[in-house]
Image (tube, grey):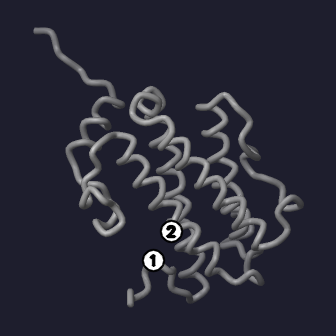
Amino acid sequence: MKRFALGPAYVLIIGLLAFPSVTPAQDDPSGGRAKTVHQALLANWNDAGRKLLAMAEDWPESKYGYRLTPATRTFQEVLLHVAGSNYDLLNRVTGKKLGDDANDPKLEAYKTKTQTIAFLKKSIEDGAAEIAKEGDSGIVPHLSPWIGYTEHMGEHYGLLVAYYRATGQVPPESRPQR
């Protein structure tokens, strides 16, 4: 008997269409359910980016050089790494040079908290704009890297939660909502 196998990208597409988006309904005009693949991707991209930006803005500038252990990146280096990786993705999928796509952008180029936040924010905004511009027809051929880089942002969000907890702080997302 011949087996029918779906590729991983097609399974993800079906999953994205079949299950509600993880963003709160008030942030999503479709009521918490994305209508298309690119809308689901955009909702998740923006959600991961929003959480990272909240941390970047909340964390004291005096602690941007904090690292969990001597072998880990500083808080600031994690943020720069995420932004550089976002541009790595964008440059790959667009074939254009849109931003600093170094895996670990140099601290000398982003000396302040304000510069770091601006770079991270721009990488997230540029990613969101590309997703919206491409729509399903442009996103689906590159869906696997888009999902991977969105997950990458989420993984580093989790890492930064550890920075908060190790210093006795509560991450913005874990604080009681007003």
Q: Position of residue 114 (x, y in %)?
A: 76, 72
How many numbered discs?
A: 2
> Which residue is nearer to you in this view: 28 or 20?
28
Report the residue at 39% width, 41% height from top.
38
Q: In the shown orientation, is residue 13 left or right of residue 124?
A: left
Q: Are marks 2 and 1 in contact (CB under 8 Å)?
A: yes
Q: Is residue 171 above or below residue 120?
A: below
Q: Amino acid at mark 2?
A: Lys
Q: Amino acid at mark 1?
A: Glu
Farthest top residue?
1
> Are there few (<14), some (14-19), or many (20+) residues within 10 Å of tag 1?
few
Q: Position of residue 34 (x, y in %)?
A: 29, 50
Report the residue at 78% width, 66% height from top.
115
Q: Is residue 82 above or below residue 144?
A: below
Quadrant assignment for the C terminus: bottom left
Q: Is residue 140 above or below residue 25?
A: above
Q: Give the labeled residue for mark 2.
A: 51
Of the image marks 2 and 1, the number of the one nearer the N terminus:
2
Q: Position of residue 98 (x, y in %)?
A: 71, 41
Residue 71 visible to the viewer: no
Circle 1 — which element? Answer: helix
Quarter of the image holding residue 141?
Answer: top left
Quarter of the image holding residue 72?
Answer: bottom right
Q: CA distance from mark 2 to mark 1?
A: 7 Å
> Which residue is nearer to you in this view: 172 or 165?
172
> Which residue is nearer to you in this view: 125 or 53?
125
Circle 2 — which element? Answer: helix
Q: Position of residue 177 (x, y in %)?
A: 38, 86
> Can you tell which mark lies on residue 173?
1
